Structure formats: structure tokens, C-alpha cells
Image (cartoon, rainbow, N blue to C red):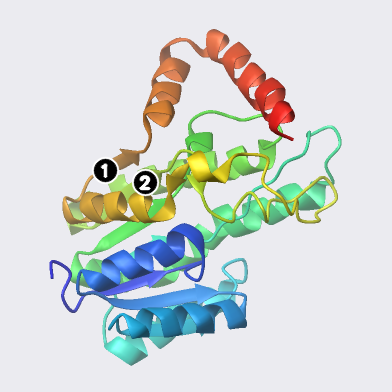
Amino acid sequence: MVLKDKVVLITGGSLGIGKACAEVFGKAGAKIVITGRNEEALEATKQDLEAQGIVVLAIRADVAIEDDNERMVAQTVAAFGRLDILMNNAGVSMRALFEEVDLKVIRQLMEVNFFGTVYATKYALPHIIAQKGSIIGISSIAGYRGLPERSGYSASKFAMNGFLEALRTEMLPKGVHVLVACPGYTASNIRNTALTKDGSQQGASPREEGKLMTAEAVAELILKATVKRKRDLILTREGKLAVFLNRFFPKMMDKIIYKREFVQVKKVK
């Protein structure tokens, strides 16, 4: 019970990596708060977690709305008296060429992925400082390497990474741990709900989900990185290779990414 009685707030906690982290951190002894926009999904996840003996509070909140972030932190502290770990997990992806996309899609991605992280962190930070706790950002390999058809998603994750890196440096004298976790391709609902050029949801994933890393495996590694207070977590061999090659051979990576993301994915479609 390495996290016994710690309080963990997970945005976007009703599905995918967020739900998996709620289970893993809860089983490690933490009290869990999950947030999301879908009340039905939140309630179903809450019941599932409680059936596993996990103490959980579900709060309907939209991270893109600043007041919702202030409220969810206040409700967390009112319920449990403290907040030890904030996991900025809520996110949305996209699949559309920039030349074709409606700019409202780019704006929505920034509001959820970047400003959602900023808002939640702003209101949680005083409580995290008091506990010398952790701020976690669930980012992406797309935060290190821009991906075609995901210009807005990549931009939002680059922004998240830069924000958390700056925050980590500011928090050095205060003992706050900041982790940037970058999963590679993970089996979750993010591709199904990815936005197309007009803002509608993609609906079907263009990848073979059964061959991807599971959300549960990702959650276990995030837990270990949190306990060890790691700085960065880059997942999958493919993800680590992409980050390495992009740093030292960016021109070559342009061609590799183009072939992989356009040619191979189109074949799956």
C-alpha cells in the first residue's frame, strides 16, 4: 500500500488510461477522484472501482472550463482534506490535414489538452505544494515529434511538455515532483473520439488496437514512475526510438513518419 491515504485527482478518469490509473493507484492504497464530462460513464467507473474496494469520488467537470477546475479541486479537498497527486489525463486527439481543418478544432484541442492542464494545475498547486506531492501530465510522443494529420494535437502536447518543464524548474525548492508521461500508441478510446476536419468524431480507429500497449500496462508504469518521482516516462520501444531519432536525425524522421503515418495507416483504413 505504497500510496495509502494519498489523494489522487485524475481528469478524464472514466475511460482509457485515466480509468486504468484510477484502478492501479486505488489498489495501491490511494483515495481516487475521477472527473469527466460524461456523467453516465463516470458513474459506471465509480461503481466498478468501488466494487474493487477503492475509495472514489466522481465529479462531473470539463477541464476546458476554468471554473470547473476550481470546483473539482475544492470538492476534492472538502471530501478528503488534502490533495497529493494531480494527474492531467483528460485529452482529445484529431485526424485531419491542417490545410483542410476548421480552426475551431485546433482551438478545442488547445483548450482541453493544454489549458485544461494549466487550469487544473493552477488550482491544485497550493495543495500539492503543502503535501510535497506530484503533478503528472499524460502527454504523448506527439509532444516530442509533430505528427501529420495531428497538427493541433502535437501543438497541444508540445505546449503541455513545455509548461510542465517550466513548472518543474520553479518547483525545485518546494519539493514538488513533476512527471511528464508519454505513452506510445495505446489501446484506448482516444482514436475513436479523435476530431475530424469539421470537429465531428472519427468514430473508428485506423489502427489495430489489439496489437497496441494496453492502458493497464501504461498505468502500472506511471505508478512506478510516480513512486520513484521520475522526471520523464517515454513508453514503448517504438516511442523511445522515435524520440531519439528525431533529436539526432530529424530530416530522416520526416520521411519515416510520412511513410508510417500516411502510407501504412491508409492501408489499414
Quarter occupied by residue 133: bottom left
What percent of the width, then of the height, locates residue 144?
48, 31
Q: Secondary structure at mark 1?
A: loop
- Looking at the image, the residue that sits furthest to the front is 210
How many other residues sit within 10 Å of disc 1, few (<14), some (14-19) or many (≥20)? some
User: In front: 67, or 17?
Assistant: 17
What percent of the width, then of the height, locates residue 243?
42, 25
Give the label on residue 64, or none: none
Q: Secondary structure at mark 2?
A: strand
* Residue for badge 2: 180
Q: What residue lies at 28% left-to-right and 54% top-to-bottom?
A: 220
Does residue 10 appear anywhere in the picture? yes
What percent of the width, then of the height, locates residue 111?
64, 58
Does residue 171 appear anywhere in the picture? no
Query: Is 207 left, or right, of 158 in this rendering?
Result: right
What percent of the width, then of the height, locates residue 207?
62, 39
Quarter occupied by residue 31: bottom left
Q: Are marks 2 and 1 in contact (CB under 8 Å)?
A: yes
User: In front: 172, or 237?
Assistant: 237
